[in-house]
Image: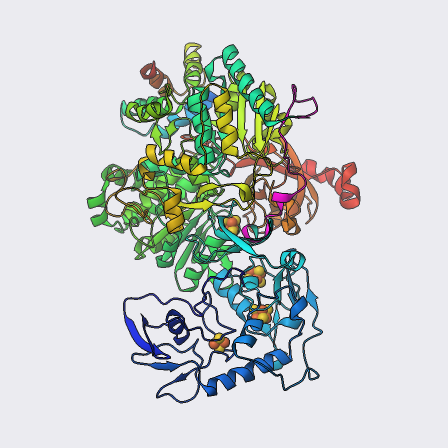
Amino acid sequence: MAGAVPAERRMANDIAANLVHLPGASAAEAVAGHIGRFWDPRMRTRLFDFVDAGADGLDPLVVEAVKLLR
Amino acid sequence: MTLLKEPDFGTPERPGPATVSVEVDGMPVTVPEGTSVMRAAALAGIDIPKLCATDSLEPFGSCRLCVVEIDGRRGTPASCTTPVAAGMSVRTQTPKVEKLRQGVMELYISDHPLDCLTCPANGDCELQDMAGVVGLRQVRYGYEGENHLDAEKDTSNPYFDFDASKCIACSRCVRACGEVQGTFALTIEGRGFDSKVSAGAGETFMESECVSCGACVQACPTSTLQEKSVVELGMPTRSVITTCAYCGVGCSFKAELRGDELVRMVPHKDGGANEGHSCVKGRFAFGYASHPDRMLKPMVREKITDPWREVEWDEAIGTVARRMRELQQQYGSGAIGAITSSRCTNEEVYVVQKMVRAAFGNNNVDTCARVCHSPTGYGLKQTFGESAGTQDFRSVAEADVIMVIGANPTDGHPVFASRMKRRLREGAKLIVVDPRRIDLVRSPHVQAEHHLQLRPSTNVAVVNAMAHVVVTEGLVDRAFVDERCEDFDGWEEFIARPENSPEATEELTGVPAEELRAAARLYAQAPNGAIYYGLGVTEHSQGSTMVMGMANLAMACGNIGRDGVGVNPLRGQNNVQGSCDMGSFPHELPGYRHVSDDAVRTVFENLWGGTILAEPGLRIPNMFDAAIDGTFRGLFVHGEDIAQSDPNLKHVTAALEAMELVVVQDLFLNETAKFAHVFLPGASFLEKDGTFTNAERRINRVRAVMKPKTGKHEWQIVSEIATAMGHPMSYGHPSEIMDEIAQVTPTFTGVSFQLLDKLGSVQWPCNEEAPEGTPIMHVDEFVRGKGRFVVTTFVPTAERSTRRFPLILTTGRILSQYNVGAQTRRTGNVAWHPEDVLELHPHDAEVRGIVDGDMVTLASRVGETRLKAEISDRMPPGVVYTTFHHPVTGANVVTTENSDWATNCPEYKVTAVQVGLARPRRDDGAENDRGRERDELLTVVD
Ligand code: SF4
Ligand code: SF4
Ligand code: SF4
Ligand code: FES
């Protein structure tokens, strides 16, 4: 869709924004946990691809979480 | 009146521990204190003649037919208004009372048209019955005197007539409208002989405040208020007890038939959810089930541009199975999936998710509850440990303060609203949290103490501010929190921060700090504070956070685990709760157990054979994204119209177009069917056998009143598809499916059709610990052990009003219509809501040069639609509102892809839009020829 943010990026950023308040490493763990529990594997793969492609526009917390998810 | 008579004890029950013993005609009987003589007599098996009394209404004492003699008392008191007293001895049949009763009847009959033989109520008329009971043999007054026989008939309501010539002025209708329904539309005008029932000053029923619930029709002892269907088809001859297929209240009905034709639906007195009441949809709007638009034959086509070809069931089922398998071979096993419906029975939903998990071999199953209440499941599970509301509906009768958040019960959940209004009339206080001034804020005999008219999207900030007040003003129920909850300290520290105070959030939320503080105190200090909420909570990008925020607030105030309190979702569709319970989420097996849990998967694998994937599948919006990406190619849509109900329709239709196989099962060729390759005709609820689970976790039986018009049950079709795909599934009867559900779901182990037939209904959990179900949850401890406080940071939505889209659109529903309207639009209910309109504030209208009734354009960054404007100050300036019941308007053309962060529930309630006067279109006719002149103004506003 023209101009729209790719779905996985938008969704991951939303999750991060809602869990960033958690202390220390637990925030990234919670984001990884949430994505692991609720996302179909192909969506995770697409998210990993974003990260590999430079993580453009991705919340740094998501990048942290992706490290845990891999 | 109802045909298949349930016992009528004359006056309502007066439950209480103290009892009184009396004698009626020599029969001893012991009843609760406060019981009427009439009811005591009925309990002793003695029916005292009556006309103005019925046990759904408070006694009124106007007809004097129920007179009795009481030893030691003077005169002949009316038994309906006389309470029992200890040792009383009552005589119901004495020459004196018999004579009085005959006199009363004579008077009634002398002013009544004696056309019994041709009257539609013949055989179902209490006046007729009573004339017989009192032994009326003559009418001395003659029929020549002054009478009402020529009174005019009011036929304005699409479902019932009012024939004033037959009215006996008993005022049962007036009282039903007030006491049962809570609308107070009717009055008795005039006095004495001139008194007559009136629906407002000189108005017809349609012009009046009447909401067509039918309570008055049911209460009327004569044919004065009579269903048109009875006039047309005659009195029914048999009845079947079943459950309404519209909203999540789940009202119980007697479907009354004449032969195989449904004549009327009468709410069932023993129905746990409704106790004899209903709304216009359940009682009257069943005509869609026999509408000519209904499809009865399966159809297939190669491409969506081809015409449909009718086929036999075998071919349709074979085509689905073959093409689904082909897609899997070509694109991988995850390339197909299904969407279950909250309108279907538990048994149907269960077999669809089983087909996906066992035959498709993946977890790509989601339910339309995704787009309404998925945050409820998530939020309540995180905090309380169970994805369901905490109370039964009856509990509201014990509430002292009722907080309604983002729900419009009088329109969305009318029968529950009537129960709630009754409690409010008794003195409970009401807090409404809603951007729109819903009817509850001020209606006859109900006035909200506080209406927190927040800006859309700021729910979490408001609930946090309320909790802030509770914590910082020392209103926390420490004993409850210490004993029953965990993680309180961290939450307390967070919520007490100054940024969560009402003063700090006032500018953002638009709610005056003082008002919010007062509301928070009222809720926290009530002996019993209850929260009821709807889609105005869930359909936000912070929907799950808000559910947890309300749970935090309730726990902090100790408002969980007994009558009169709780956190209660008002579910939209009839079986939202059930479809979620039945495992139609891509990450959860039946009973809300995660697919990654090896032990749980093993239970199902052992029963079904094969392996169940441990990884979650795609949710509905993810399916659409994956379809556009090319990894998702085939979809089975069970009873849902996603091409109308889901947000950002352009995206949805692009996804549907991208798929190679779309299978739609529905009653009608709906919008989604335009993109389908196989159409499987569905059965209406009148043809279904199974169960629905309502918003209070109550499992109700749905019973077929006729055979499926399509020749096959829906669960049968699904089983046959699975079988054709190589996973044999066979059931002889839906009760066998429920037995399987009970076998694999710990909260359902005690449930069976047999138990439901015995108890009427049962609220899960129903198992060894609770063999007759669980009306109130979390009584001694939470399902998860300790109630968990969760920090609920307010994260604003990405959807902002801008210069281009300066207004916020929010959506809702209306009483007479249901969801996308596929059913209700095919009934007489269109009389109330022929089209969706856009409500906008006079100020917003004025600056755009819009007047009431103008056609306007409604545009967001994703799409544009046209609809009629209705000027209204129910919303604050800057907020516009519409419903989504009609496809032509397509409100979802403008809603966006934003969704709840935790569950992807779409953010229907917040869309930045612009509204402008529409240019006239050829098909608008003359109605909008002002359009062009206003264009200039519109540009300025833009
Ligand atoms: S139909 Fe319902 S709202 Fe209308 S007058 Fe009768 S009781 Fe009142
Ligand atoms: S309309 Fe029916 S219920 Fe109402 S006062 Fe007349 S007879 Fe009684
Ligand atoms: S309140 Fe809901 S369940 Fe009850 S009759 Fe109306 S639509 Fe049906
Ligand atoms: S029934 Fe008691 S006065 Fe009418």
Which region shows up in magenta? B282-310
Quadrant where the N terminus of chain B lies?
bottom right
Choose between B438 and B698: the one closer to the eye: B698
- The residue depicted at 60 percent of the width and 25 percent of the height is B678
Magenta stretch: includes residue B570 = no
Query: Left or right of B159: which side holds B576?
Result: left
Please provide percent x and percent y for residue B193.
62, 81
Please provide percent x and percent y for residue B149.
69, 75
- The residue depicted at 40 percent of the width and 64 percent of the height is B426
- Main SS category, magenta section: loop
- The colour scheme applied to this rendered structure is rainbow
* One can see residue B338 in this view: yes
Please provide percent x and percent y for residue B40.
37, 72
Magenta stretch: includes residue B306 = yes
Choose between B750 and B512: the one closer to the eye: B750
Quadrant where the C terminus of chain B lies?
top right
Q: How many marks?
A: 0
* One can see residue B187 in this view: no
- The residue depicted at 45 percent of the width and 75 percent of the height is B48
Query: Left or right of A40: which side holds B552?
Result: left
Choose between B729 and B762: the one closer to the eye: B729
B273 w.r.t. B182: above or below:
above
Please provide percent x and percent y for residue B820.
58, 39
